Amino acid sequence: MEPVDVDVDVLVVGGGIVGIYQLHRVLEAGFTAALIEAGNGVGGTWYWNRYPQARFDSESYTYAYLFSEELFDEWEWQEHFAAQPEIERYLNHVVDRFDLRRHIRLGARVTAARFGDETGTWTVRTDDGTETRARFLVAATGLLSVPFYPAVPGRDDFGGESYHTGLWPTEPVDFAGKRVAVIGTGSSGVQLIPAIADVAASLTVYQRTANWCTPLNNRPITPDEQSALRADFESIRHTLYTSASGFLHVPHDRGAFEDTPEERLAFFEGMWNSPGFSKMTSNYTDILTDPAANDEWCRFMIGKISAIVDDPETRAKLIPDHRYGQRRPPFVTGYYETFNKPTVSLVDLKTTPILQVTHDGIETADGLREFDIIVWATGFDFGTGALNRMGITGRGGIALVDEWADGPSTYLGVVCRGFPNLFFPGGPHGATGNNPRYAGDQVDFVTGVLVHAREVGADVIEVSEAAEERWSDMVNTYASTSPFSESSYFFGSNVPGKPVRYLLNPGGRPKLLSTIARAVRDGYGDFELSRSPARTGSDR
């Protein structure tokens, strides 16, 4: 049998934060590589989610790449939490700075990816009919790349403009003087709502679940802070490479009831005014584990909401009925204040569900409201959505969507049995925290596995059954220890018919890093490395 030619050693699918880094790493390691991306520009999440005031809620310099001090020095983030236009500019700068663009093909959506048992290669087909053959396939398709629309009757009958926050057009949407509906108050909806409230003639917010929204507390980065960031690069990188959360936030040193009530109140006030995720990562050590401590924090936040929102009925609708941390908490700027505007109203979908969308607007039990624009801020098919839509078939022709019919089974959140030479950093079961940090850990691990296989003369890499079982059992066994409830999209429960399984890693980044370290120390013994039949036959 003749050896099989490939177009590239490594084909990366997805041009977001993770895919760009994976392309850079494998090229740096001496592999031939290409990247294909469905969008007409790089950025992934930060290409598609360009709605007004879409922005980081991790600090810009902690979300950004850390592999190059020169890159870190030369890019000056303008805000502690950058908005989408700056994020997109940054990622394009990285692509050009490291000469990656010539390896990238845009506007190419994967429709099928088939593993060849005899050849040990992947054949990947895109919607333009192009086929690419690669030895290794890396699906850096992300957790938040398949927008979800609820099955509302008549959704396609609406005669006005309709948008999803996760598929925003490249041309700005004109909200001025329009009657606007926003459906959903998750992380996207709460960013968009204040941004358009002043220009729309009217804004109606349809809320299924109230969330614990706390201030983002964004501000410009001062020249002195820019200098300090440069000077502290090595320390910052060390902290971000090793911290459990992937943030620079300093964990607190005590539980809630080690303080007096007066001290607790002052501490909570400091938390309310702290930046972003520090409200989770630097709060009292037992805020997510002790219901009494959590209740104290929730009562404090209710007081803040009550002091901001004037109308008692609206205020009551905005107060969540779950504990803080059971759902991913959004971070906001001017969100609660928006509901004091006379042109803004709130509809509680639990008491007043949508009956249908009509040509003219949205009908509930309270009647029909007419709109010019409907925005669906209804989230994503989290974790497995993109992977299950790529038409992936592995060894013996088994489809990934069938293999994962009851939920994903993985090793390190990066590979799965039966699909050799397929990797999916940034996918399900990775970790929890600042996504680019743990996804970067996975990219580095994937690159190390590829280099090791090359060194030992192997061209087929498959995780052992025992290793996958250990990791998946850990995820499923300890999912109950996660603070997130099964109503969270982290369990996939927002998508009807999707198996309710924990899609993160309850062991967090520490478990990910310790398992990676052991795997590397053991010479990647959790993998079965071999030569494909075609290559073995060619050596005879």
Image (cartoon, rainbow, N blue to C red):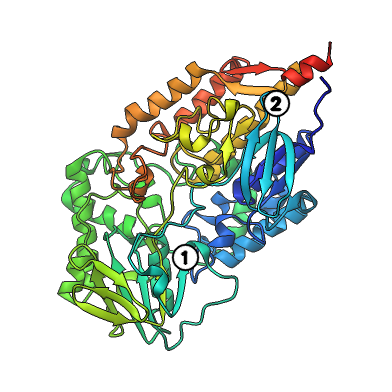
Quarter of the figure with residue 336? bottom left
Visible residue check, residue 91: yes
Decide which of 502, 324 is in the foreground and name it: 502
Image height of 438 relative to 313, above or below: above
Q: Secondary structure at mark 2?
A: loop
Task: Say which residue appears at 33% left-offset and 66% top-offset.
Answer: 153
The location of residue 4, given as percent across then percent down, is 80, 28
The location of residue 480, given as percent across then percent down, is 28, 33
| Residue position for label 2 | 120
| Residue position for label 1 | 165
User: Which residue appears farthest toward the top when viewing the image?
Assistant: 540
Q: In the rendered structure, which amino acid carries the disc numbered 1? A: Thr
Please tell me the numbered disc located at residue 220: none
Which quadrant: the C terminus? top right
Decide which of 130, 145 is in the foreground and name it: 130
Q: Please state if 387 lies on the left or on the right of 329 as rendered.
A: right
Task: Say which residue appears at 52% left-offset and 78% top-offset.
Answer: 173
Image height of 381 relative to 349, above or below: above
Q: Secondary structure at mark 1?
A: helix
